[in-house]
Image (cartoon, rainbow, N blue to C red):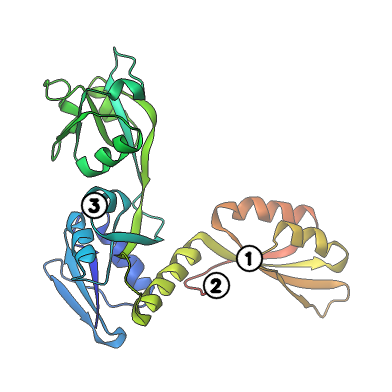
Amino acid sequence: MLRIAVPNKGSLAEASISVLQEAGYKQRSDSRDLVLVDADNNVEFYYLRPRDIAIYVGSGELEAGITGRDLLIDSGADAKEVLSLDFGGSTFRFAGPVDQNFTVADIAGKRVATAYPGLVSAHLSDLKLTAEVVRLDGAVESSVRLGVADLIADVVSTGNTLRQAGLKIFGEPILTSEAVVITRQGVEVRSELEVLIRRLQGVVTARKYVLLDYDIPSATVEAACAITPGLESPTISPLQKPGWVAVRAMVLRKDTNRVMDELWNVGARGILVTDIHACRL
């Protein structure tokens, strides 16, 4: 039976359960459950701390798991990312006191506080910089004011928390993270795991796209298809009305209204948008 790790709490937990349910897998209804067996799909789901999932997968105890890209890198586990899930996004940045104009080169020899020492150490190594990494489990923003560190490396969203702590961002992002599916390095992927990955990929794609249907005069169908080329090619069917065709194509959800406006301008009518719940491409 395939063994898969799922975050048991935190920002990734609910979204991970949701994407697995959309992919056709049974999930726990009680947050106290630690294991759930989906006999129909021959899968056991283990609900673990997100920070521990890469360790279990890398050691071979579990075949795969969902965790954050940041947690995977920070763990140093023998695991790899095989699919990004397009949720749980975050950005890691360096930040220092507002009264000091730090550059990345200035990090050398400084104390850097972070809750992700493995990730930051790996990044500093890539930059060929030597610094003291101070591990903290929380309230990283207070470390500079309290004299524990000279600067920090942490998740940044709006930057409001940093400004309140008297800090400002500098340098390029350390990492852009999101939820990912991981497997063990150097191990052949089992057929059951291939199915799970394919299903999840279908859900991720379905969430990004919608199905667009519209009617268009044959004389302007080429212009319309240039607006909606689809993934490979749009589907075109003749209508009973002479000189008209029906077109169906997938378009990016975020572009839907702009595309509808452009189609209307070239003569399309009866434009309909339909959600896609799952797909295989």
Which one is in front in this view, the residue at disc 2 or the one at disc 3?
3
Residue 82 in sight in this render: yes
Relative to residue 188, is residue 122 depicted above or below?
Answer: above
Give the SS element for disc 3: loop
Instruction: Please state the horizontal and vertical placement of residue 174, each as a whole percent of the image.
Output: 35, 37
Give the alpha-carbon distance from disc 2 to disc 3, as whole Å. Answer: 33 Å
Instruction: Please state the horizontal and vertical placement of residue 47, each as a whole percent of the image.
Output: 18, 67
Residue shown at 33%/67% (left/top)?
Answer: 186
Q: Which mark is residue 126?
A: none
* Residue bearing mark 2: 281
Give the SS element for disc 1: loop
Quick check: marks 1 and 2 in contact, CB under 8 Å?
Answer: yes
Quick check: marks 1 and 3 in contact, CB under 8 Å?
Answer: no
Left or right of residue 151: residue 243: right
**Which quarter of the image is occupied by the C terminus?**
bottom right
* Image quadrant where residue 15 sits: bottom left
Residue 156 in sight in this render: no
Three-letter residue code for mark 1: Leu
Query: Dot 3: few (<14), some (14–19), or many (≥20) neighbours within 10 Å?
Result: some
Which one is in front in this view, the residue at disc 1 or the one at disc 3?
3
Q: Which mark is residue 76?
A: 3
* Residue bearing mark 1: 231
Three-letter residue code for mark 3: Gly
Three-letter residue code for mark 2: Leu
Which of disc 3 and disc 1 is earlier in sequence?
3
